[in-house]
């Protein structure tokens, strides 16, 4: 028997098989996309923190009536990303952006607005409040700041338990809000690739339980912790401060990028996926977004309806270990 | 009424009827806030032994013997046993510092960090136990000093980039380090960093600045004016922990009673 006859598949059969596999693969990919719920993300151009931020936010928020219904007459908790104070680096959600969001939620009828954060790197929240200027902006508005690091802890049980910690402590102020709004900065991150509305939830874990920084979350895996916190807390809304973002060695030591955008939406994974695309990075390569996708979240651009302004993506630099995220 | 009197009046009012102190007036009692309240003065009223004996939390009660040994040694015994038995988890492969040096952690099964290590060292030094563990803590803290002279929460750098120090970690590290000749360069650089609290003040920075300078025989007075101004009728921002730290610093300088020495 010629040796070629021993080959179990002819070339033609191999080609046919390859075509079939490709079709199956496309089918699986399409099915994976189709099973992702449709999501909406609003982008708004805004080049300066001195712009009419309240007006821009109100206009954008009007596209989300279900969120507004929760805000009206309710207690809105704004959870910005406050990390450390280095005046030359845009590390934190800008205080003017936070104050504008507080004013916007009061304007739409929130009974109470609280700004709350449990900074991972700074125990001295008084210093953080005073040096960022946030204290000066919130006081005249009568908007209180709650240090979530010192807040009473409530145990939550993430459904997938990726951290294998079983339960996670989350601040009571967060869990008792009628509307929790995650307000991250648009940044790259040296451990997670990007840090956006889902990673921002690390700050909901009280430091008095997990310490500074929240080291048990690192030991349990940062993507695991992000996904578990998101799936257990399920914030109803997020607004990303991308007016000036950070690239490179974020979340602290990176470089400013004037991106001139703010994003908002009710679906946090979809919002983070779109924000990642604006940084010309691939959300499918971000581990925590892959995990969220497995839990039924929306990441595919084909399932995300973009509202508002058309924003041209701009490549954000990432550290070498995340070069694979480059689109 | 002096700032120290205002601080103590607020602390008296914010003590919970069920025992213990909250971080923020009106909140639930918390171990660290209740331990720090014991630093507000030498009198028995500041040490809530009954509440603390039923509400032990590892890292914050690492500090308990440091502030309570003279008043209630029996209360401190379980905390001392826990301090001596505690082992942090080493981390291999990090560069720029030795993450295998043992210290104390916020949560068991994780790495050593500056503040829990400092709490444990202060307690062991106060009671005079486990000198070898104190030396391990000294080695760990000295190894973690940042390029700017202070201390970050645990590491002086990450992925090859130097981290900036924080005033609170630096203050606790300085309080924990024994005032010994061979440590003088480390301590002097740390004390110099603490003076940043004079230009970028906060209650933690000013209180720990005064206390750390006192601990190493330096003049604490530059820190005191700004600190006193921060204590109002509702303490410092209705915060028990900050008000108790302020009271500890003011008591040490005005009355000569130092909770941490």
Image (cartoon, coloured by chain):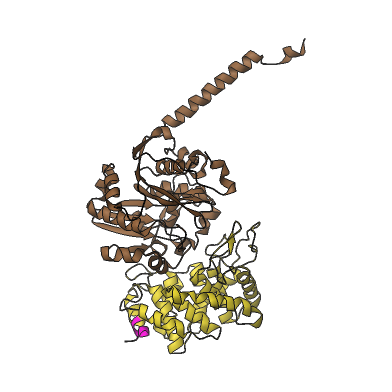
Chain colours: A brown, B yellow
Quarter in which the N terminus of chain A is drawn: top right
As displayed, is residue A138 above or below residue A10?
below
- Give A1 or A240, whichever is nearer the viewer: A240
- Give A287 or A101, whichever is nearer the viewer: A101
Residue B50: quadrant of the picture: bottom left
Residue at the spot x=38%, y=82% of the render?
Answer: B228
Q: Position of residue B165 (x, y in %)?
A: 53, 68
- Give B53 or A65, whichever is nearer the viewer: A65
Q: Is residue B9 magenta?
A: no
Q: Position of residue B195 (x, y in %)?
A: 50, 77
Secondary structure mostly seen in magenta is: helix
Drawn side of residue B253 relative to residue B25, left or right: right
Residue at the spot x=29%, y=48% of the render?
Answer: A56
As displayed, is residue A118 above or below residue B80?
above
Q: Which residues are magenta?
A: B1-6
Query: How many numbered marks, from 0 up?
Result: 0
Q: Position of residue A153 (x, y in %)?
A: 40, 60
Drawn side of residue B40 relative to residue A2, left or right: left
Whether residue B78 is visible: no
As displayed, is residue A171 above or below residue A274?
below
Drawn side of residue A166 relative to residue B140, left or right: left
As displayed, is residue A284 above or below residue A137?
above
Whether residue B118 is visible: yes
Q: Position of residue B259 (x, y in %)?
A: 48, 82
- Give A211 or A71, whichever is nearer the viewer: A71
Q: Residue furthest top?
A: A1
Residue at the spot x=52%, y=21% of the render?
Answer: A23
Residue B183: quadrant of the picture: bottom right
Residue A66: quadrant of the picture: top left
């Amino acid at each position: 028997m010629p040796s070629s006859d021993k080959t179990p598949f002819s070339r033609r059969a191999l080609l046919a098989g390859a075509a079939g596999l490709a079709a199956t693969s496309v089918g699986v990919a399409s099915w994976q996309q189709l099973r992702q719920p449709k999501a909406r993300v609003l982008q708004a151009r805004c080049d300066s923190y001195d712009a009419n931020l309240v007006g821009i936010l109100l206009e954008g928020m009007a596209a989300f009536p279900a969120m507004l219904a929760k805000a009206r007459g309710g207690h809105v908790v704004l959870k910005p990303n406050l990390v450390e104070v280095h005046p030359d680096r845009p590390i934190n959600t800008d205080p003017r952006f936070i104050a504008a969001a507080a004013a916007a939620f009061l304007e739409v009828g929130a009974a109470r607005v609280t700004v709350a954060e449990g900074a991972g790197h700074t125990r001295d929240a008084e210093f953080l409040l005073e040096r960022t200027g946030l204290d000066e902006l919130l006081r005249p508005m009568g908007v209180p700041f709650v240090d979530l690091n010192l807040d009473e802890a409530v145990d939550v049980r993430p459904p997938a338990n990726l951290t294998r910690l079983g339960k996670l402590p989350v601040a009571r102020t967060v869990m008792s809000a009628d509307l929790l709004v995650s307000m991250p900065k648009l940044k790259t991150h040296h451990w997670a690739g990007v840090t956006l509305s889902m990673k921002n939830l690390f700050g909901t874990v009280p430091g008095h339980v997990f310490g500074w920084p929240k080291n048990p979350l690192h030991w349990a895996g940062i993507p695991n912790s992000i996904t578990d916190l998101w799936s257990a807390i399920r914030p109803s809304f997020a607004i990303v401060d991308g007016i000036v973002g950070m690239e490179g060695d974020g979340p602290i030591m990176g470089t400013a990028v004037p991106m001139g955008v703010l994003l908002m939406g009710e679906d946090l994974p979809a919002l983070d996926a779109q924000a990642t695309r604006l940084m010309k990075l691939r959300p499918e390569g971000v581990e925590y977004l892959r995990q969220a996708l497995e839990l039924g979240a929306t990441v595919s651009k084909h399932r995300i309806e973009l509202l508002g302004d058309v924003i041209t993506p701009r490549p954000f630099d990432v550290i070498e270990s995340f070069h694979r995220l480059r689109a | 009424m002096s700032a120290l009197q205002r601080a103590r009046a607020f602390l008296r009012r914010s003590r919970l009827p069920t025992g213990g102190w909250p971080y923020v007036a009106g909140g639930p009692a918390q171990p660290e806030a209740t331990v720090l309240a014991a630093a507000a003065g030498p009198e028995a009223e500041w040490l809530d032994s009954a509440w603390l004996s039923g509400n032990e939390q590892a890292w914050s009660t690492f500090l308990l013997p440091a502030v309570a040994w003279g008043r209630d040694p029996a209360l401190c015994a379980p905390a001392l046993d826990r301090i001596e038995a505690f082992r942090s988890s080493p981390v291999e492969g990090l560069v720029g510092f030795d993450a295998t040096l043992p210290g104390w952690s916020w949560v068991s099964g994780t790495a050593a960090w500056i503040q829990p290590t400092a709490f444990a060292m202060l307690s062991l030094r106060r009671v005079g136990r486990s000198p070898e563990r104190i030396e391990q803590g000294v080695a760990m803290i000295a190894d973690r000093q940042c390029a700017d002279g202070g201390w970050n929460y645990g590491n002086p750098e990450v992925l090859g980039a130097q981290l900036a120090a924080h005033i609170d970690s630096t203050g606790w590290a300085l309080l924990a380090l024994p005032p010994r000749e061979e440590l003088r360069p480390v301590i002097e650089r740390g004390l110099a960093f603490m003076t940043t609290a004079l230009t970028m003040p906060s209650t933690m920075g000013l209180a720990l600045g005064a206390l750390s300078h006192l601990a190493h025989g330096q003049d604490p007075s530059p820190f005191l004016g700004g600190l006193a101004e921060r204590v109002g009728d509702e303490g410092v921002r209705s915060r028990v922990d900050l008000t108790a730290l302020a009271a500890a610093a003011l008591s040490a300088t005005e009355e000569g009673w130092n909770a941490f020495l």
